[in-house]
Image (tube, helix red, strand yellow):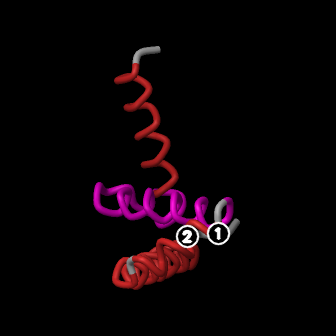
Amino acid sequence: MDQKTFAMQFEALLEKYAELLVGTSDKDITEKVKMYALYTHIAKTMPALAKHWNALYPDAKDGMKELMADIKRLNEEHRNTKPHP
């Protein structure tokens, strides 16, 4: 598989993840979900790195907190609007 095909297919995975997580896969939301997913993974697998980054860039830390709160809010709204079987 060539790199371009792989990149397109991976982007489709991210878009679907965003859609399932928050109910939409528009470009801005998908980009936020990418950052959310990657930061969450880093914080879990290398907490010292996340802590260092947070200390080094306090403004970015605040931005990440806002982004994570937005994703959480969108996820809760999405779950509350989904029909239950």
Q: Residue at x 63, y 69 (%)?
A: 48
Q: CA distance from mark 2 to mark 1?
A: 5 Å
Stretch of the chain drawn in magenta:
19-45
10 over 84 or under it: above or below: above
Q: Residue at x 53, y 60 (%)?
A: 37
Furthest-top residue in view?
Answer: 1
Q: Residue at x 39, y 22 (%)?
A: 3
SS assignment for the magenta stretch, majority: helix
15 over 42 or under it: above or below: above
Give the quadrant of residue 23: bottom left
| Mark 2 Cα shell of 10 Å, populated few (<14), some (14-19), many (≥20) | some
| Circle on res. 47 | 1
Residue 74 at x, y = what percent? 46, 76
Q: Amino acid type of disc 1?
A: Pro
| Mark 1 Cα shell of 10 Å, populated few (<14), some (14-19), many (≥20) | few
Question: Is residue 55 one of those drawn in magenta?
Answer: no
Which of 13/77 is in front? 13
* Left or right for 82, reference 26: right
Q: Circles 2 and 1: CB distance less than 8 Å? A: yes
Residue 38 at x, y = what percent? 51, 58
Which of 69/57 is in front? 57
| Circle on res. 50 | 2
Residue 8 at x, y = what percent? 37, 31
